[in-house]
Image (cartoon, grey):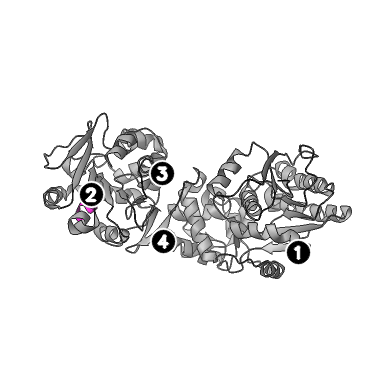
Amino acid sequence: MESDSIVFGASGLIGRYLVAELLRRGHGVAAAVRGDGAGLTAWLAGQDVPVDGLAVVRADITEPGLGLPGGLKEIRDVYNCAGRYAFGMSAEEARATNVTGALHVLDWAANRPRLRRMVHVSGYRVSSVDGLPDYRRLGAYEASKVEADAAVRARARELGLPLSIANPATVLGPGQFVGLASVVADLWRGRLPAVPGGREVFVPVVDAGYLAAFLARMPEFEEGAYWVLDDGTPVLPELVGLLAGHLGVRAPRRTVPVGLLRRLPRALTGADPETLSFLSTDRYDTAPAGALAERAGLRPPPVEQALRTWADDLVAARFGATGTPRGPYGYQRVAGTATWVTGERERPSHVLLHGLPLDSEAWREVSDRLDGPVLAADLPGLGRSGPARGPAEDWLTDLLTGSGRPVLVAHSLACAPALRYAAAHPDRVSRLVLIAPAFLQAPSPWPLRTPPAALLLRRMSAARLAGALGVPESPAIASAAAALARRGQARRVVAALRGAHAVRDELRKLLDQVRVPVEIVAGSADPLTVAVDRPVTTIAGAGHYPQLTHPDQVAAVL
């Protein structure tokens, strides 16, 4: 298929969503990227986007001519989504892409014989300026976007080029880790004592999918500049409060005025000076964008839903420390607790419960090897979940409200609520598998004999945590270490360890009474110390965490 549209910056957040939208609408799309485009094509495949009309081309917008091959004469619509969205850049670095690069794209578009429209993606904080904007006051990123906006308009007028400009707000989608994302990260970690700015600060947002649909339709309508943002975005303190409730953390009650933030040292506030100009009460003229959307039949998703989904994406990717994993995942309310849930909750074949000091990421290697849908969740007060609102047994009962009779799998500390649930609901479980059940093994002194234990855990890097547990470093260990650094998390882990020692006798008696089939799995280096009248599988060479070190053998048992 001949390409009728070209997207510069196709591998970025906005670019890849736009490429997907255009392909779904039946366009032939040339995706202009600096690399080989493998990441883009993999992402499109993961989104089930038809790629028959896709052509990946290499381009560098900082060069005149863009380094593109010949051809592409059938291009009607040119989209420039390329740009550097980062703070701390030099003026030269920011201008090279955001200003000079934008003009190079414009010049290239002017030579397309069938050009219908040039669509330039700008920013919502742009404003008219006389001469060069103040790079020192605004910061390189914002100043370069302001300069580019004016320069692109002027060059388009000079060339008689049909131009439309989109001025999007903060774009919500997987992979957006700059700006507002840092506020969400501090909130999740318990390091946001106050909301930056005043009570009326407005930091608008827009959903990535909606923005892509809007951009795709822009060439069909009249030229102009369109502020694409959700007017329903809550003011910043309310936005933070909404996300705090979703994440199961406490929302800060105070705000810090922008003027004070500017005067305080960055080491104290943690605020990048370039972000402070975005803390504004300004509102924007969205009427033209609203009129275009109505004519195009476009409607954004509810802003609260978009914010919650984005927060889930941020947590899933550990705020940019790792790639976004396969879904479904996200926070759900379970027995009043904000619970991190992955997988199928309605009719799972296996339900996997983690032990200490891990989270449900510890099951990733095992769940990938299992047939059928899997449900895994972070226990209340542990991992990514919020503090418990009641007994773990009530939480587990609410979690397992779907149909079917899954295999219930629990590791170490989680064996207690799993055993109690199976005893109380034998008709809801087909089999119970207890992996390294702590109540049948020698009591572990770690880290209870190392005062202060909570402080030790909180400061552990992934490498030190892996060494302490006797397992290799892995994404599961990195996830656990990140969670332990959250406010109050390490303290809850230590309390859970101590509480586990108090119920050992109770659980041993309950094991004799439970009426569902039970199988026990233990590592040869971490054997049972209590004889049991239940089938036991011993995994050679494994310690207390066989799901991390021997996932093939654990999956085979399950």
Q: CA distance from mark 2 to mark 3?
A: 29 Å
Relative to 338, 32 lies left or right: right
Mark 4: amino acid: Arg
Mark 2: amino acid: Arg
Label 2 or label 4, whichever comes before in sequence order: 4
Dot 3 and dot 1 residues touching (CB under 8 Å): no
Q: Position of residue 208 (x, y in %)?
A: 60, 56
Q: CA distance from mark 4 to mark 3?
A: 21 Å
Give the magenta part as a residue range. Answer: 416-420
Q: Position of residue 515 (x, y in %)?
A: 15, 53
Residue, disc 4: 250
Which label is found at residue 431? 2
Label 1 or label 4, whichever comes before in sequence order: 1
Of badges 2 and 4, the one in the foreground is: 2
Mark 3: amino acid: Ser
Residue, disc 1: 221
Residue, disc 3: 479
Q: Residue at x 37, y 35 (%)?
A: 464
Relative to 363, 44 lies left or right: right
Q: Position of residue 184 (x, y in %)?
A: 50, 55
Whether residue 139 is visible:
no
